[in-house]
Image: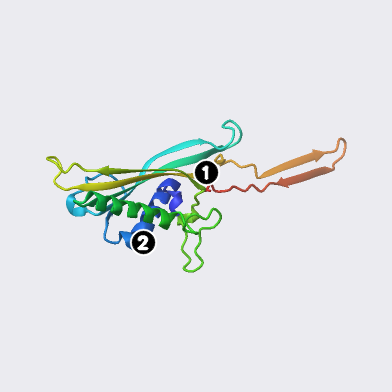
Amino acid sequence: MGITDTQSFTLVIRDLFFDTLTKKEPFFASYHARKTRMVSIQPEQLPFLGVYLVDENMTPDGDANAGEVRFVHNARIGFSVMIANNDQDAAEQQIDAAYWRIMNRLWTDQYIMNLLDTTNPTDGSQNPDNTRIESIQRGVRRHVFGNTAQSNQTPIAEMQYEVTVLYRTYWPPNVTDDLNEIVVTTHVKDNALEIIRKYDFTQTRRKSNGG
């Protein structure tokens, strides 16, 4: 039983990005990190890295009324980098460096972004359940600076970066009463001869998977 038996591919991808940046990227070693915005960020938690699920849009893969349910998923994953610095220019350089590190670490990774097989032969690691990303459809970056006046004692600079991750899933019908065998009995009129034919059918099902 793999993680995608209980969790969506989108959450797996979000966690993959988070784990890569927090566990395999020295740039963010000193950062506090979170996966949700449930709790407000406090000044003592800066510098801060957040990797969030923003939203997910699903459209039909092909004609919606032909065949099994098939989706093209466009999932938005958001990255937030927050730092405290009184120098505006230095603060912007810091958050820009964080943005550039995210770009260079994730999108150039030959295993994370492998459309066929994400297994790293060196250590045997792979994207959980070999979850594959088909493409990065869109990216949007913005810089947000906190108000250093009355309402905000700590001068904060934040880099907000959102990417749209594309992958596909297929949802064949869950048929529990499969037709496995047909038995045909033939009687010849006025004859005791009886012919019995059995036809066995093997049905295979494929698991839906991203990519």
- Residue in the picture at 81% in, 43% down: 194
Residue with the most extreme right position? 190
The CA distance from mark 1 to mark 2 is 30 Å
Q: Examine the rendering and report whether any part of residue 34 can be seen.
A: no
Residue at image mark 1: 169
Horizontal side of residue 12 vs 173, given as left or right: left
Horizontal side of residue 100 vs 200, given as left or right: left
Taking depth in this image into account, of 126 and 47 the one nearest to the observer is 47
Residue 95: give x, y in percent of width and height: 30, 51
Q: Examine the rendering and report whether any part of residue 163 can be seen.
A: yes
Q: Name which quarter of the figure residue 39 lies in.
A: top left
- Residue in the picture at 77% in, 45% down: 197
- Residue in the picture at 51% in, 58% down: 118
Horizontal side of residue 50 vs 57, given as left or right: left
Taking depth in this image into account, of 71 and 159 the one nearest to the observer is 159
In terms of secondary structure, where does tag 2 sit? loop
Residue 166: give x, y in percent of width and height: 49, 44
Considering only vertical position in the picture, is 132 above or below 124? Answer: above
| Neighbours of disc 1 within 10 Å: few (<14), some (14-19), many (20+) | some
- Lower position in the chain sequence, tag 1 or tag 2: 2
Name the amino acid, label 2. Answer: Glu
- Residue in the picture at 38% in, 52% down: 15
Residue at image mark 2: 25
Residue 168: give x, y in percent of width and height: 52, 44
| Neighbours of disc 2 within 10 Å: few (<14), some (14-19), many (20+) | some
In terms of secondary structure, where does tag 1 sit? strand
Residue 29: give x, y in percent of width and height: 30, 61
> Which dot, 1 or 2, sits closer to the camera?
2
Residue 48 numbered mark, or none: none
Name the amino acid, label 1. Answer: Thr
Taking depth in this image into account, of 2 and 118 the one nearest to the observer is 118
